[in-house]
Image (cartoon, helix red, strand yellow):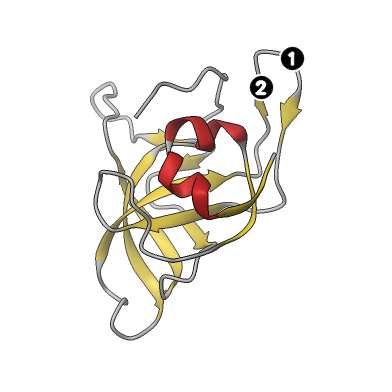
Amino acid sequence: MQPVKSKITKALNHGSYVETCDNSGAKLLRVMTVMGKKTVAGRTPSCGIGDLLMASVRKGAPEMRKQVVFAVLVRQRKEFRRPSGERIKFEDNAAVVLKDDKGSPKGTMIKGAVPREIAERWPMVAKLATIIV
């Protein structure tokens, strides 16, 4: 996993609900924790595009519900800035469910656009994406 060159604004908090954009069987995730984030005592961690999340499945297929899964945030409504100066934002917040924390996705296709920052950091997820922005 490589670092992201862009200045990613951390948009989603601990406890936020995020839709999935893959065909893994999960429909709605609740962010439990952001992996690798260290914060000041009492502050809840927040996440942005490219962050590894641990989430619980709230809606979806019966065998997926109530499970704790790893996920990667691939889209956020809050804009973030690239080194070139352009700002990117999406229509929705979306995540991709992973098999493990190594980065291999559970589903076989990703609906919608995925930013270039995900392609740099998570190449296995980028292979399934139809559009890279």
Q: Residue drawn 31% across and 77% down?
A: 65
Residue type, mark 1 in image: Gly
| Label 1 element class | loop
Q: Is residue 43 above or below residue 17?
A: above
Image quadrant where one finds the N terminus? top left
Residue 85, disc: 1
- Name the image quarter holding residue 11: top right
Is the residue 124 above or below the residue 41 in the image? below
Within 10 Å of disc 2 (Cα), the crowding (few <14, some 14-19, many 20+) is some
In the drawing, does residue 28 fall left or right of residue 14?
right
User: Could you tell whether 56 is left or right of 113 in the image?
Assistant: left
Label 2 and label 1: CA atoms lie apart by 6 Å
Find disc 2 in the rendering and name its residue. 81
Q: Secondary structure at mark 2?
A: strand
Badge 1 local density, few (<14 within 10 Å), some, or many (20+)? Answer: few
Outermost front residue:
127
Quadrant location, the C terminus = top right
Q: Position of residue 122 (x, y in %)?
A: 43, 38
- In the figure, 64 relative to 111: above or below? below
Asked if the residue at tag 1 contacts the one at tag 2, i.e. Cβ–Cβ closer than 8 Å, the answer is yes
For the view shown, which residue lies furthest in the right direction?
86
